[in-house]
Image (spheres, helix red, strand yellow):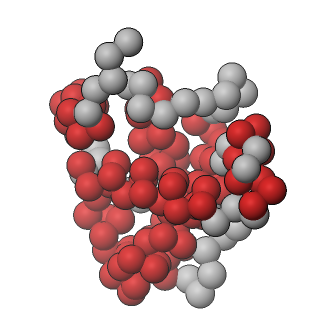
Amino acid sequence: MVERPFWEVVDEVRERDPRYRREAYGFLMAALARTVDRLPPERRGDPERRHLSGGELVTGMLETAREEYGPLAAVVFEEWGLRCSEDVGEMVFQLIEAGQLSARPEDRREDFAVGGSLAEALRSPRPPRGDGA
């Protein structure tokens, strides 16, 4: 299998489904890496335990957005088309289907349905905690 450049794949995904801005996919990958890096060392070092749940990734994205964009985070997410946690799951599964991310057999889009509006969560004092976080 030939590995394809990430942004080329994102552009193809967006040709089929333009709901989410190109920047949102790059942010998703950066937030994923940052969230994994922040796992406890014993979990980060074990490939089986390093896998993030949908809720953990959503929480990681909210935390990363707050750090990167501060009070403008909700506006940025809205501009990118990220309105609810299910949008994060949809992007993840688009990247899985395109061969850019991997999933376990038990992983489902529904795992990202952790509740509410992302803008609301970003405006609240603390983002909701994902399962397993």
- Give the number of callouts: 0
Res 125 → quadrant: bottom right
- Position of residue 70 in the picture relative to residue 58 (left or right): left
- Position of residue 117 in the picture relative to residue 75 (left or right): right
Question: Quadrant of the image for the C terminus?
Answer: bottom right
Residue 119: x %, y % from top left: 44, 71
Residue drawn at x 40%, y 84% as measured from the top left: 70
Residue 47: x %, y % from top left: 71, 39
One can see residue 89 in this view: yes
- Position of residue 79 in the picture relative to residue 84 (left or right): left
Residue drawn at x 42%, y 53% as measured from the top left: 28
Q: In this picture, is 64 found above or below 14?
A: below
Residue drawn at x 69%, y 61% as measured from the top left: 39
Q: In this picture, is 14 found above or below 62?
A: above
In this rendered view, identify the residue nearer to me: 41 or 75: 41
Question: Quadrant of the image for the N terminus?
Answer: top left
Q: In this picture, is 124 found above or below 56?
A: below
Res 72 → quadrant: bottom left
- Residue furthest to the top in view is 1
Residue 68: x %, y % from top left: 39, 77
Residue drawn at x 48%, y 70% as measured from the top left: 64
Residue 90: x %, y % from top left: 46, 39
One can see residue 133 in this view: no
